[in-house]
Amino acid sequence: MTEATISVKPKKSGSSLHRLQTKEQISAYLFVLPAFIVILVFGLFPIGYSFYMSLFNWRVTKGSFVGDKNYLLIFGSWTNLLITIVGILLIIGAFWLWSNAFKSLKKGEQIAKLVAALVMIIGGVIFITGWGQMYDSGNKSFLNSLIITLYYALGTVPAEVILGMILAFMLYQDIIGKEVFRMVYFLPYVTPSVTSAVVFQIIFSLRETSIANGVIGFFGISPQKWRFEPRPIINLLGADFAGFLAGPSLALVSIMLYGIWSFVGYNTVIFLAGLGNIPKETYEAAEIDGATKFDMFRNITMPLLSPTTFYLTLIGFIGTFKAFNHIYVLRTPSAGDSVITTSLLIFDQFYKANQYSVATAQAIVLFLVILGLTLAQNKLMGERVFYG
Amino acid sequence: MDKTAIAKKPVVSVNRAKRSPFYYPLKALTYVILLGGAIVFIFPFFWMISSSLMTLGETITRQILPKVPQWVNYQEAWNQAKFSKYFINSVLVTLGTLTGLLITSILAGYAFGRMDFKGKNILFGLFLATMMIPESVTLIPNYLMIRGSIIPLPGGTWLNTYWALTIPFIANAFSIFLLRQFFAQIPKELWDAARMDGADHLRFLIQVVLPISKAPIMTVLLFGFTGSWNAFQWPLLVTTKDTWRPIMVGLWSFVTEAGPQTHLLMAGAVISLLPILLIYFLTQKQFTQGIATTGLKG
């Protein structure tokens, strides 16, 4: 068949062949055109326009050109940002040095670790200095929101990954009703986030008869205010911390619990797919060699699952920085800033306060933070991943 | 794992001997944890349905089941609380979005997968880049665009219109990427044969490619459907009246505007969930596999 088409071609004159190709080119452009217009207008153009807006004093309508003022409002000064970034880079570098010292060096290991620890301390000090200066002279609510987002990420992603792995590993055994379990676990993820968040609004309400209070009442704990509680959870337990050391508020923890509930099933399904890709022969060989189940889990399953774990951690982290719907539905005025993650802050800044240019500048910073996190995770974790 | 181990005869005796003391307790523990997990996952759904059938009084005192199921709640939510309006809005918006999405992504996916043109790779890379951009960045310019502040729009502004809810979503890079991957794998011989018969690209696409591409098109439809049905942030921004408010915004505004009417709210929540549940149960395998292989939520 291919020969036939080739033999046809030479008979045609060069110009008609050229015309044929031009015709194909034109129809290809026509095929792409509808999608291109939509993606150009609503996907590509807004990126540039966001940056353009962030350079003006823009409140509902365009005002005067202000240059980097909206960015300075966030950081205080560019020097602050530079110091903070240098601190972060040093920490990352030290971490890289530390993990590489484990691998390659035999004799110099101690020295390398010592150097790495030193660099990490210096990096930490520089980072805290830069961050402190930013905090003093920059936008406190924006910087706070980054910390809230970080709490939210650290409180949900590891739990989701670990629970997902445990459930997937159990489901992978000989289990009756495997399909039903998988379907049930996946259900919260499939459910529209506004719908399930509305249900959790009632579950985590401050009524003494709410479901959440019922559950902790069963363990003899007195009723809590859940979504309405701005105090850090650690203070409720009796310890007296203040500031960021105190950790997330109970309101944020309520949202975290919702987040874990809705996301574990997704991780389970992905881990199940990952487990299915591990060749059975590996386990059989290990079994003959007398390996216990725990040995096999530690030395076969975990390393061979590491790409999946890495992927889910990355997706989870990026997801928390983008998360909006359920936090928007579950937040309460009385929880105050303690649940305002960066994407919510940006939305409020735009939708409620009409500070368009401030919001776009913050959105661009958020985007760069996400990009940086992705690259850092690729660098740090990517090297430890075992790609069978 | 256990199955294959048992199937291999020589291993059986070793296995049984080694595993016997802990085998059944471990198995029991596994079931306890799995069932416990299932209860935690399913309970909010059970409770949602149960309280949607309670009286308002019953939702306040912690009841697990209503004394008499109040089916009238659904009637009230559907009529008085305007969930019928929101529901129909969402159906129309979803249908419109899916129609547009199918046309744009099939055509573009085909061009990227099976045609040659100048600038193809650059264009495809640009498309893919949009997948990494967080919504916070594009939201504000898109709002201004729809408001008619950037370029003049027919009718002045598109706020509170059908167009605002559909047009921005009738094409996305993910659907194009998904279809491109599939279309590119179709053997070249099919195209050569079709061309011998005098078919052009469009006829080949419609008569040959589409009939064998049901699975990826289904995945695009599923993601498009959930994305459109679950949409919240954008509709919240561009609809201020009931006229075009879709179901998720309706549900949210019911919370803020109607005060504590938990029984009706839960009935509304069930209504908003039904289409998704229906599709999930009907296409369960494809739904789960689609997400597992692409790793994205619509």
Image: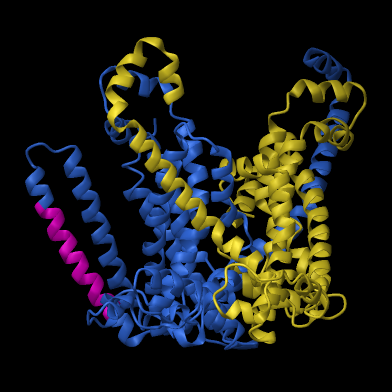
Chain colours: A blue, B yellow
Residue B293: x %, y % from top left: 58, 40
Residue B270: x %, y % from top left: 70, 65
Residue A238: x %, y % from top left: 24, 80
Q: Is residue A126 magenta?
A: yes
Q: Residue furthest top?
A: B10
Residue A109: x %, y % from top left: 10, 43
Image point 28% across, 34% down: which residue? A294
Q: Is residue B23 left or right of residue B210?
A: left
Q: Is residue A200 left or right of residue B223?
A: left
**In this view of the protein, which residue sits in the foreground, A177 or B222?**
A177
Q: Residue furthest right?
A: B198
Above or below for A50 versus B122: below
> Residue B4, located in which quarter of the rendered image?
top left
The magenta-colored residue range is A114-132
> Residue B98, located in which quarter of the rendered image?
bottom right
Above or below for B66 versus A144: above
Query: What is the magenta segment's predominant secondary structure?
Result: helix
Above or below for A157 versus A323: above
**How many tags in the picture?**
0
Image point 75% across, 53% down: which residue? A35
> Residue B247, located in which quarter of the rendered image?
bottom right
Question: Could you tell me which quadrant the N terminus of chain B lies in?
Answer: top left
Q: Residue furthest front?
A: B67
**In this view of the protein, which residue sits in the foreground, A323 or B50?**
B50
| Residue A162 visible in image | yes
